[in-house]
Amino acid sequence: MRRYGKHTDEDDIRSRPNRKGNRPRTNIRPKHEDAAEGMVLTVDRGRLTCLVEDRTVLAMKARELGRKAAVVGDRVALVGDLSGAKDTLARIVRIEERTSVLRRTADDDDPYERVVVANADQLAIVTALADPEPRPRLIDRCLVAAYDGGLEPLLVMTKSDLAPPDKLLELYGDLDIPYVVTNREELEDGVAADRVREFLTGRTTAFVGHSGVGKTTLVNALVPADRRRVTGHVNAVTGRGRHTTTSALALPLHGVDDWVIDTPGVRSFGLAHIDPSRVIHAFPDLEEGTTGCPRACSHDEPDCALDAWVAEGHADPARLYSLRRLLATRERTEGD
């Protein structure tokens, strides 16, 4: 039944009042053009500590952002109380476009991906040469995540006083990954920190590694003024380390563009979110040879054009082996 006639006027239309106030509802959101720029340093139970100019500000995510979450390293726009005073709370109204993203899933069957760090330039993969033993499959998975997310990898090997690095270096030599080798004595006298710091200048570097490899100890040595957490030990029964870092934290190094991001120790690194076709971009010497590949080629099948490309002498066979080893990482568990 028609409530109004054909020729209705605005005054004839009944408007439903807003029960929560007199202001009419709208889908138009404010642009917050005067919002301050900041960087997320750490996240703790819905509260985000951000760096705004030269002070830290506690903030929460605005409702209008929906389910989009801000993570450590994100550049954000904030409004509200930006004084950083005690018991004040600002509001994050915008998350700027990310230049890189480090992601992982709990395991390879988990469809839910977790963003670990945003806007990092480099991923420092920390592994002990002994106590606990190196886990190459976990290193491979971190490499795949770095290549997929747009981060350059750096391999940091600790505890060389317990075992030599030769075997691990031989395994990753064909990938041309920069590396640093350290030992406990060098960590104590600062030599290790100085050597690693040379690779961090002008970059934001995320540190990742499984528990007990000395990752947080190294971060403590790099940023002594902001000692990260109490370091743990390796369990003598399981051979695994204790988690001493419970949340990611960005720490300034020695310049405005130098940042170190310490992340919690991992025991698994799922790659369910990874598109294998993007891994080839980390091998520019092989990428040109994929033009003859069949559609949706996995680069590890009989019809792959890379075999003929490499056989013709366009690239080193060891590089093709390294690519296929990384692509096969999703089919193996970290302990294999």
Image (tube, rainbow, N blue to C red):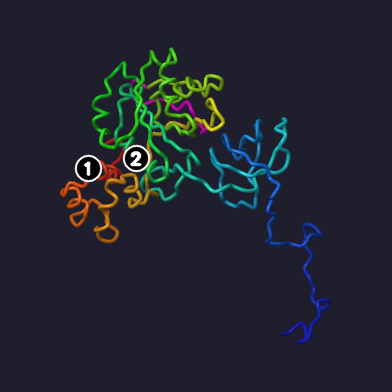
Q: Quadrant of the N terminus?
A: bottom right
User: Which residue occupies the extreme right position in the image?
Assistant: 11
Residue toward you, 219 or 289: 289
Q: Tag 2's secondary structure?
A: helix
**Residue beneath the point at 38% across and 13% down:** 185
Residue 292 versus residue 142 in the image, above or below: below
Task: Indicate whether residue 236 is drawn in magenta.
Answer: yes
- Which is nearer the N-term, disc 1 or disc 2? 2
**Residue beneath the point at 76% across and 87% down:** 6
Residue toward you, 244 or 71: 71
Point out residue 283 in the picture as x, y percentages from the top left corner.
31, 45
Task: Indicate whether residue 227 is drawn in magenta.
Answer: no
Magenta stretch, overall SS: loop
Label 2: which residue? 141
Residue 301 versus residue 214 in the image, above or below: below
Residue 135 versus residue 78 in the image, above or below: above
User: What residue type is disc 2 on?
Assistant: Arg
Q: Image quarter for residue 9? A: bottom right
Which mark is on residue 321? Answer: 1
Q: Quadrant of the C terminus?
A: top left
Q: Which residues are magenta?
A: 235-249
**Residue beneath the point at 56% across and 22% down:** 226
**Residue beneath the point at 52% across and 33% down:** 247
Task: Tell whether label 2 touches label 1 (CB within 8 Å).
Answer: no
Between the C-alphas of marks 1 and 2, the distance is: 16 Å
